[in-house]
Image: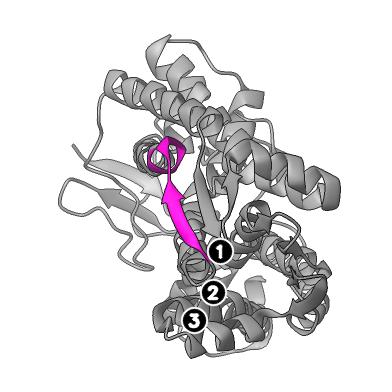
Amino acid sequence: MDKVTVCSSCDLIVKLDEHDQYCPRCGKKLLSTKNPVNSDIAVVSVSAIIFLIISIVEPYMSINSMGLTANMSLLSIVDILEKQWGGLLYCFLFFTFFAPLYVLVTIFCTCGLKFKPNVLVGKIYSFNHKMCMVDVFILGIIVSLVKLTSLAEVVFYTGFYTSFIFSILLLWCCINYKPEKLWNEIKPQEKIDLNVGDNAKDQQVKCCHECGYIYKSTNAVDTCPRCKAKNEYRISNSIVKSCCLLIAALIFYLPSNLYPVMYTEFLFRTTGSNIIDGVVAMWEMNSYFVAIVILVASIFIPAFKILSLGYILYVSSKANDYNKLKLSKLYRCVLFIGRWSLIDVYVVIIMSSIVRIGGILTIYPGFAIVCFCSVVLITIFSAESFDERLIWDDKNEK
C-alpha cells in the first residue's frame, strides 16, 4: 500500500511502498515492512520485565583471589555508588533500569492491556526510548570480564545470564515498537494532500520534531495538533544551542582524559589510572581486542563526535557548496555512535562494585569518570539539538 509522508531528515515529500522504503534524496529509512502484532510485542515486554526482576534479585557474579571471595549483584552496585558517587548512581539507574522499565511497562499497557496513552506518556516514552543503554551495559560487562580474569577467577550466577536475555528482549521491543507507533495510538496521522517531490516547507507543511505529526500551517510558529509542542518550519537557534553544548563537552573532554578514571588500592597503596593507562595495560596483557574497544569507545569516538559535530555546524551554517548527502550521513553516524562511549563508564562501575577483596584489593571511581560521562551525555544532547533539515536548505533560507 502506497504511503505519502515527509522525510524528517531532509524535509522532502516522498511516496513509499513495500519496495521503496527509503528517502530517495537523503537515504533515510522511512518505512518498515516488519510489523509484529501488538499482542506479540506485549508478551515479549512482559518476558523482558520478568528477566529484569530476576537479574536484580539474583546474584550476578563473584571473583576469587588470594583465597578471598567478593560477590556482586546489581543491588550491590547501587549500594556502593550511593556512598561514593551519587550522580553516577542516578545515571546508571536511569539508563539501565528506569528508562528500560518505563519503555516495557508502557508497551505492555498499550499493546497488552489496550490502555489509551496520553501526550505526557508519549513524550516520556520518546525520551526513554532513546536513553535505554542496556546493550551498552552488557558490552561493558564483557570488557570488564576480560579485565577481571587477569586479577582473579570469575564465577557467573543466574543474574548474569538473565541480564543477557533481558537485553535481547528489550532490544527487540525497542526496534518493533518505536515512538511513532505510540504517537499513532494517541492520535493517528490524518491524510493531507501533498505534492510528491517538493519540500514540505515550500508547501507550508510542518513535520513535528517531537512526535512526527504532519500538518499544514501558514503560521511561522504554532503548536502541534497532536503533542502540543511548539513548532516551526525549522527549529529556532538550533545551531547556536548545539554549538553551546558542544563547547561544554569539549571543556569536560580534557579532564576526562587527563585525570584518573579509577583508583586501585592494593595492600594500602593507591594508584590512579586514566583511560590511556587502561588501554596500555590491556595491550601489555595481550588483551588486544579489549584494548582496541576501550581506545575506540573512550578516546576516538568522543573526539570524532566533537570534531564531526563542529564540522557539521560550521559547514551547514557557513559553507556555500558541500555534499549534502555525505554531511547528512555523517550526522546520522554521530547520532548512532553517541551512546557507545558509555562503555568505559560501565566498566568502571562494574569493576568498582566487585573488586573489593577484604581490604587487600579495592577499585573505586575517580573524578574523571564523571567528566567522561558528562562528555558522552552532552554530545548526545548537542547532536539531538541540531536540526538536520538545515543541511538540505539553501544558504539564503537559513
Q: Nearer the viewer, mark 2 or mark 3?
A: 3
Is disc 3 surrounded by few (<14), some (14 to 19) or many (20+) residues within 10 Å? Answer: many
Residue drawn where x is 43% and y is 50% of the image: 155
Q: Are marks 1 and 3 in contact (CB under 8 Å)?
A: no
Amino acid type assigned to the residue bearing label 2 in the image: Ala
**Residue 232: % across, % down:** 68, 49
Residue sitting at x 43%, y 23%: 50
Find residue 344 and report its horizontal and vertical position in percent. Answer: 60, 67
Residue sitting at 49 percent across and 88 percent down?
Answer: 283
Q: Which residue type carries mark 3?
A: Ala
| Image position of 141 (left or right of 32) | right
- Residue that mark 3 sits on: 291
Nearer to us in this view, 6 or 50: 50
Label 2 neighbourhood size at 10 Å, few (<14), some (14-19), many (20+)? many
In what element is the residue under mark 3? helix
Q: Which residue is mark 1?
A: 343
Name the image quarter holding residue 175.
Answer: top left
Q: Which residues are magenta?
A: 152-161
Q: Amino acid at mark 1?
A: Ile
Where residue 293 is drawn, which disc sits there? Answer: none
Q: Is residue 225 above or below residue 393?
A: above
Structural distance between the alpha carbons of marks 1 and 2: 7 Å
Residue 183 visible, this orientation: no
Answer left or right for 233 relative to 62. right
Question: Which tag, 1 or 2, sits closer to the chain's start?
Answer: 2
Residue behind mark 2 = 297
Q: Earlier in the sequence, mark 2 or mark 3?
A: 3
Q: Of the residues tagged 1 and 3, which is closer to the observer?
A: 3
Find the distance from the CA under tag 1 to the CA under tag 3. Answer: 12 Å
Task: Name the residue located 46 percent from the left edge and 53 percent from the top edge.
Answer: 138
